[in-house]
Image (tube, rainbow, N blue to C red):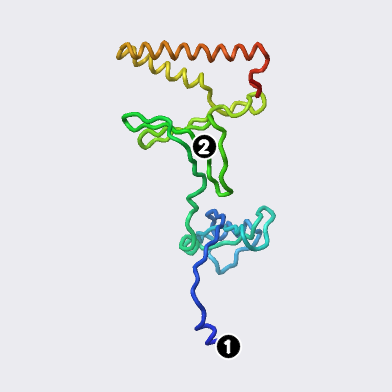
Amino acid sequence: MSKKLLALSMVAYIGTKSVLAVPMTRSEYCEYRGWKLPENEDPSDPGYLIEYKDGGKANHPDHEGYISWSPKDIFEYSYQPDCVQNVVFGSEIHKDDNGVTASHNETVKTPEGEQLLEPGHFYDVLAGDHLIPIQFQLGPVKEVGVNGVTSEALLAIVLHRLRVLNAKFPCRENSLAITNLEQGFMWLEQRTRNRQKRGVEGLNIA
């Protein structure tokens, strides 16, 4: 086939490729690679350092894939950010009359796959445009350190708020709620004291 016929026979294809990228000027990229910037190139040209994870032999000791540099306009025309970085799925466990919801997070989807979350540890409260994450202590404190809130801490907050509200707007319902929450708080504190006496507090032992 002649070169002219070969050129006329070529068909357009659209491909997809997942890459890692970070904004970096041309001079920054050359410095990163340990290269001298060519005299005919603008050091301030905006662009991206790109790492190809699914093709090409690694060419830098700090990267697992092949890296290169692309001008900003070409890169942003060719690639879109991967919006599915970490997507959490769960179940709604409460919704009030104003639309404020509480959800129990059960799984998280990442670029590496789907992961089950430890039940009873990860929650979200959605109030209008505000998302408030709540993470309970995950793992024994003596083994992993403090990494989340406790039921007692959240109960203390609710009790404090109810007492403030009851001082401003006293009613039977507030008083009963305070009494029952105080009792629940007392039993949780008693549970901790009993575990301390048995020497199992902070350990993964019943």
Where disc 1 sits, the SS reads loop
Numbered circle sitting on residue 12 = none
Q: Badge 2: few (under 14), some or many (20 or more) residues near its Cα, within 10 Å? A: some
Taking the image as shown, residue 178 lies to the left or right of residue 191, namely left
Q: Residue at image x 44%, y 14%?
A: 181
Residue 34, image x and y in percent?
Answer: 66, 59
Q: Residue at image x 47%, y 11%?
A: 183
Q: Furthest residue to the right?
A: 61
Taking the image as shown, residue 203 lies to the left or right of residue 91, namely right
Q: Mark 2 touching mark 1, by CB under 8 A?
A: no
Q: Quadrant of the N terminus?
A: bottom right
Q: Nearer the viewer, residue 72 or 14?
A: 14
Taking the image as shown, residue 139 lies to the left or right of residue 106, namely right
Camera-nearest label, 2 or 1: 2
Residue 142, image x and y in percent?
Answer: 66, 23
Numbered circle sitting on residue 106 = 2
Q: Nearer the viewer, residue 206 or 79?
A: 206
Q: How many numbered markers are drawn? A: 2
Amino acid carrying mark 1 in the image: Met
Up/down of 9 relative to 193, above or below: below
Residue 28, image x and y in percent?
Answer: 58, 56
Q: Furthest residue to the bottom?
A: 2
Quadrant in which residue 167 is drawn: top left
Where disc 2 sits, the SS reads strand
Numbered circle sitting on residue 1 = 1
Up/down of 74 relative to 201, above or below: below
Mark 2 or mark 1: whose residue is earlier in sequence? 1
Quadrant in which residue 202 is drawn: top right
